[in-house]
Image (tube, rainbow, N blue to C red):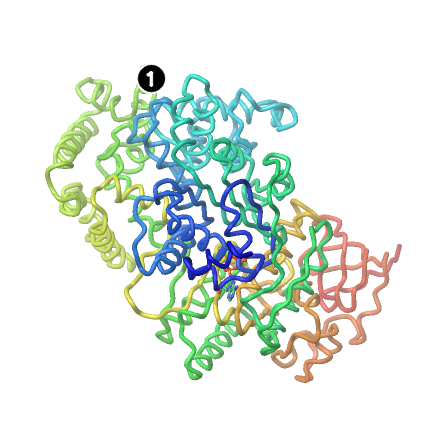
Amino acid sequence: MQIAEKQIESDPGLSALNHGQREAVLAVDGPVLVLAGAGTGKTRVLTTRIAHILRARRAQPPEILAVTFTNKAAQEMRERVSHLLDGRPVEGWWLGTFHALAVRMLRRHAELAGLTPNFTIIDPDDQQRLIKQIMETENIDPKKSPPRQVASYIDRWKDKGLLPAAVTMNDGADAADGKMLLLYKRYQERLKQVNACDFGDLLLHMITIFKNPQHAAALDEYRRRFRYILVDEYQDTNVAQYMWLRLLAKGSNNICCVGDDDQSIYGWRGAEVGNILRFEKDFPGAKIVRLEQNYRSTGHILAAANGVIARNEGRLGKNLFTDAGDGEKIAVRGLWDGAAEARWVAEEIEQLQNKKWGLDNIAILVRAGFQTREFEERFIQLGVPYRVIGGQRFYERLEIRDALAYFRVIAQPADDLALERIVNTPKRGVGGTTVQALYANARAKGISLHDSIIQMKDTDELRGKAKAALEALMNDFARWRSLLSSSPHTALAGMVLDESGYIKMWQEDKSPDAPGRIENLKELVTGMAEFESLPAFLEHVSLVMENQDNGAVEHVSLMTLHGAKGLEFDAVFLPGWEEGLFPSQKTMDEHGMKGLEEERRLAYVGITRARKRAFISFAANRRLYGNWVSAIPSRFVDELPEDNVEVTADTGLYGEGRSKHWDSSGSNPSSAPARGVGADGGGFRRGARVFHDKFGQGTVINVDGHKLDINFDAGGHKRVMDSFVRPLSETV
Ligand code: ATP
Ligand code: MG
């Protein structure tokens, strides 16, 4: 204890910790696992621990490996540690996401993976295009196995750390009669040919290198280098990430992981909560620290979150408490449609602003990316500054992707996908047949599309116009590439967009969105100035999909629940709590009970992001994929403990006689649009045969107030509101 007091004196960061947290920080040597609920200071433990290690001169910054879940979280941690070190910037360290850290390693050892250091990282879009090409070559019908599905098999195998040769029957080696595995194999070969990796490869290649005894020196180097390893959001690591960590940690054995099983929300991407349970086995003698005090949220918010998550089975279980006082209840609001919801949210935000709450401390967390649009439109209309965090908004735009393709071919001629994208954009008379001929030659000779063009442009295999155009294009690329090291990359980028005719193409385009696209292209070049080179910029784009910060303006943050992990805001809006949207129907259809529990953990993550105010809303009508659908409140709304919420709704929303919350709403809806059934709950019994406008006929399997679980003859299991259901004459 005395020692601890002495240490506190020399490290003021420690005095801001409770006993358990301090214990986790001071146990610097040996494996440590902090297993604790939301807002208990796990991330604070990590940052203080890093600062403590640096202050005590146990290691230099480059000797620490710290893994965060998002780039935003990495940035925050950098700031927090720098703050703990009295503002001293922390340079040269290995702090970032698994992807960012792995790509940095792989660039240094690319040859060991059969690549050159300037390899391209392809995104999911390119990944699918590549798969489609391979399927064509292999004569596999993309209608039977859509490329998206093939990609998801490949991703899952990579998440498990499996190269094609390692995939067993248990892992689905026989999927689609073994075609999936065959495509995986061909896909890996093809990636190597074009000197590219997908995201999954970054770790997979490193693991493969580390496991190869011939490359033991590489692993040894990192084991010696990283004296301390720290991992945030440990509950969401997948097998490949875990293997990578374990390989590295076997050096110093100084690994500290923090996590919360209740916040595991990436099961669909291969995350294994089991990694938490394995920790003690893989790292014998590990110190396990549990934290129970939540420092983030007020009482009602914490109690509501605890109430919801308590419905999950198979939890490690924990009791969280807060000293922060009850605070305000969670506002739960039912609205007519999405536009009304956006108006309501904007009004509430305005009221918060009137109370001098900063926009930086307000976030809207959505289940699905498309949900942001309605809020964005409202904010644009009202002039409320906002940012979409973690979305791919800017870099996803067509013109940006085209421009990036030009830059990619300059940086990396073998980038076939990029070249294919722009070889005839703007139109140069290089049609599909020509491209196919070029590819056929490339395949026959085992060379890239780029080299194939160079070979064929002088032959009569190509038509006159295409021939001349390709010749000119290749000359252009050669010239641009020669300027890569001598001229500023922004100037080069401008030149490329100009000389390629790409900007001109949009200038001549008369569609209403063309001027905006030109502005975007200009903005792209402006943004590049922040990077030292074209390759550095391209790397940034492939890794960081977050929008650039538009200066010092305070803004509301819009992001997905998944992207909000680890973050906190004074006020959090959680819109779209409707059955099917949240919990997501797709997740439930695909993963049943397990999927539902993961959705519930998402709800827990969402609520626990709030410090002082949480707002939950749902709409009775929603436009989904172009069609209007009527929606019913999410079951999670009902799971919120009544004592911790304040419910209100637009009048006449769902007819009379609501579920428990509706009765207590006090808004007393009058005009009841209930159709076909009485206002007393419909009187449906289990086993009743019913008809629903959208889903057709089905059998009621469960009645929960006004909500019915129905097995639809065609559409499977759904939960619907009784007012949208008519009884069929026969009963079973
Ligand atoms: P999550 O599970 O959501 O990632 P977490 O466990 O990582 O949460 P932190 O983000 O580290 O929690 O901490 C939550 C909030 O509580 C932060 O604002 C942090 O500064 C504050 N906090 C943590 N520990 C203490 C403490 N001992 N005293 C006061 N405030 C604290
Ligand atoms: Mg955290």
The reply, left or right, for residue 377 in relation to residue 694 is: left
Query: In x, y percent, where is residue 31?
Result: 55, 41
Residue 262: horizontal and vertical position, in percent?
63, 54
Residue furthest front in the image:
2
On screen, residue 51 versus residue 460, left or right, reads right
Q: Would you identify the image quadrant in which residue 657 lies?
A: bottom right
Whether residue 449 is visible:
yes
Frontmost residue, 186 versus 328: 328
Q: Which amino acid lies under the numbered mark 1 shown in the image of this protein? A: Gly
* Res 205 quadrant in image: top left
Q: Residue at x 31, y 20 (%)?
A: 442
Percent of width and height locating residue 660? 74, 74
Q: Residue at x 26, y 32 (%)?
A: 412
> Circle 1 sits on which residue?
446
Q: Nearer the viewer, residue 46 or 712?
A: 46
**Along the viewing direction, whichever of 23 and 103 lies nearer the viewer:** 23
Is 668 situated left or right of 282 in this image? right
Which residue is at a point 17% across and 41% down the rendered structure image?
500
Element type at mark 1: loop
